Amino acid sequence: MQYVYTFTDKNNKVIHVGQSLYPKRRYYDLVVRPPRNRSQGYFHGQDLQLNIIQSFNTKKEALELEGILKKANRIEHTESTRSHKGAMISGAIRKTCPHCSKEMDVRNYARWHGDKCKLINV
């Protein structure tokens, strides 16, 4: 069973929309737990209310409603997140392999170069 949920502040403004099998656990991870990494404590210390909107049998249906609610409440990524994601997609962030001296985007570097480069033992 998939649930679509929202976090609202004191003024009933929607701060976050999401879908999960366990929305109460997600609330705990994002609001109650202090931050340890990017997926925990994002809203730590804020006085937010968990509202379960609807339950679905399939994840596809839950994702459709989640997208509709995000558009309706104008929930968008911050400018820094958009610029970083855009740079990653376009390949603007590039690295040079120290072993073969090829320049490539970070995804190819992580997959094929660095410690995994073919020319390490040559």
Image (cartoon, grey):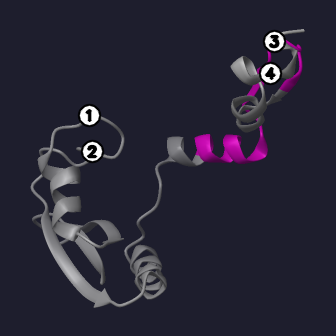
Badge 2 amino acid = Gln
Magenta span of residues? 83-103
Residue 40, numbered label: 2
| Location of residue 16 by image quarter | bottom left
Q: Are marks 1 and 4 in contact (CB under 8 Å)?
A: no
Badge 3 amino acid = Ile
First reached walking from the N terminus: tag 1 or tag 4? 1
Badge 1 amino acid = Arg
First reached walking from the N terminus: tag 2 or tag 3? 2
Q: Position of residue 41 (x, y in %)?
A: 23, 44
Task: Tell me if residue 67 comes above or below residue 110 in the rendering.
Answer: below
Number of disc labels: 4
Q: Residue at x 26, y 34 (%)?
A: 36
Q: Is residue 10 left or right of residue 40?
A: left
* Distance between the alpha carbons at the discs numbered 3 and 4: 6 Å
Task: Assign a secondary structure to mark 2.
Answer: loop
Residue 117, numbered label: 4
User: Is 111 inside the magenta-drawn segment?
Assistant: no
Q: Residue at x 77, y 24 (%)?
A: 113
The nearer-to-camera label among 1 and 4 is 4
Q: Position of residue 67 (x, y in %)?
A: 47, 77
Q: Are marks 3 and 4 in contact (CB under 8 Å)?
A: yes
First reached walking from the N terminus: tag 2 or tag 4? 2
| Location of residue 12 by image quarter | bottom left
